[in-house]
Amino acid sequence: MKSFNYKRHNDYKWVMVIDLDRCNGCGACVIACQAENNIPVVGEKLALQKRTMSWLRIERYFDGEWPNLRVAFLPMPCQQCDSAPCEPVCPVFATYQNPEGLNAMIYNRCIGTRFCGNNCPYGVRKFNWFDYELESPLEEQLNPDVSVRSKGVMEKCTFCIQRIRRGKDTAKDENRKVRDGDIMPACSQSCPTNAIMFGNVNDPHSKVAEMAESKRRLLLLEEHGTHPSVIYLKGGV
């Protein structure tokens, strides 16, 4: 098996490893992501029109027929591709790859063409159709570290970049590099089965660097040459 191939970025290259054998489809990661990143709940009507805003979804796959039926779950965040199809089609360079391998967004530059969403083979980008307002006092639940996006822009998973920045700032104040386990995105922190691991794959002693070489490794749509930064460990189905 070939080694996990990725671009050599600066000191950090952030990677997420998801163990499909451990995922039970509970949805805790989805709710945690929604709360952490100020993602609106659109309501039943818009949900039926496929206008949900969740940055993370859980795919379900079935094997066999009832009663001998098995279900496998696959969490689907932004894959943070090293060769991201979403980036070259943006006419205003609102999305780009930052020095640490993340497909970042500049929300106040986005003009909502949705080219990036159409070009994403994973379907993880969301278009903000409306300005969603929370009735008082529900606005107090908003995370002050994350901007509230306005209508007409594309948005997506950022690997909780605000937590990455906080972890790097703490490490800088202590005159060291980020240690393995210092940073946990909301989805990883909330997972009751520890199915989601996160870290710097440039650190050879990190858990994700070890898992990146696992024989169970699976990269989604690897044949498209997107070089995703989300690694799945194959489950039993």
Image (cartoon, helix red, strand yellow):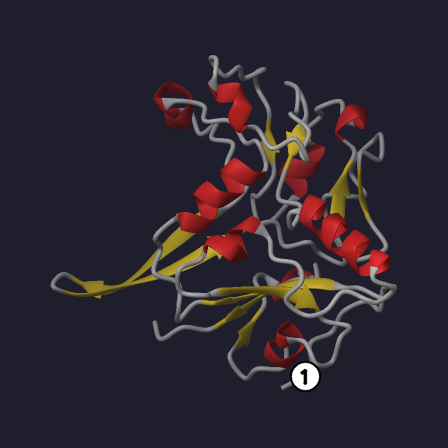
Query: Is residue 150 in view from this perspective?
Result: yes
| 115 w.r.t. 230: above or below | above
Give the residue displayed 78% in from the left and 24% down from the top: 108
Which of 49 and 201 lies nearest the eye of the viewer?
A: 201
Q: Which residue is mark 1?
A: 2
Q: Amino acid at mark 1?
A: Lys
The outermost residue toward the left is 67
Give the residue displayed 68% in from the left and 49% down from the top: 163
Secondary structure category for the residue under label 1: loop
Res 82 → quadrant:
bottom right
Q: Quadrant of the C terminus?
A: bottom left
> Is residue 33 shown left or right of residue 91?
left
Which of 105 and 225 lies nearest the eye of the viewer?
A: 105
> Is residue 9 shown left or right of residue 231?
right
Residue 143 horizontal/vertical position (percent): 60, 33
Res 145 → quadrant:
top right
Across the whole image, how many numbered discs are drawn on residues? 1
| 149 w.r.t. 12: above or below | above
Residue 204 horizontal/vertical position (percent): 74, 80
Give the residue displayed 67% in from the left and 34% down from the top: 146
Residue 79 horizontal/vertical position (percent): 63, 54
Res 96 → quadrant:
top right
Residue 215 horizontal/vertical position (percent): 54, 84
Give the residue displayed 63% in from the left and 66% down from the top: 181
The outermost residue toward the front is 174
Q: Quadrant of the N terminus?
A: bottom right
| 236 w.r.t. 128: above or below | below
Query: Is residue 101 in view from this perspective?
Result: no
Q: Residues within 10 Å of mark 1 (few under 14, many from 20)?
A: few
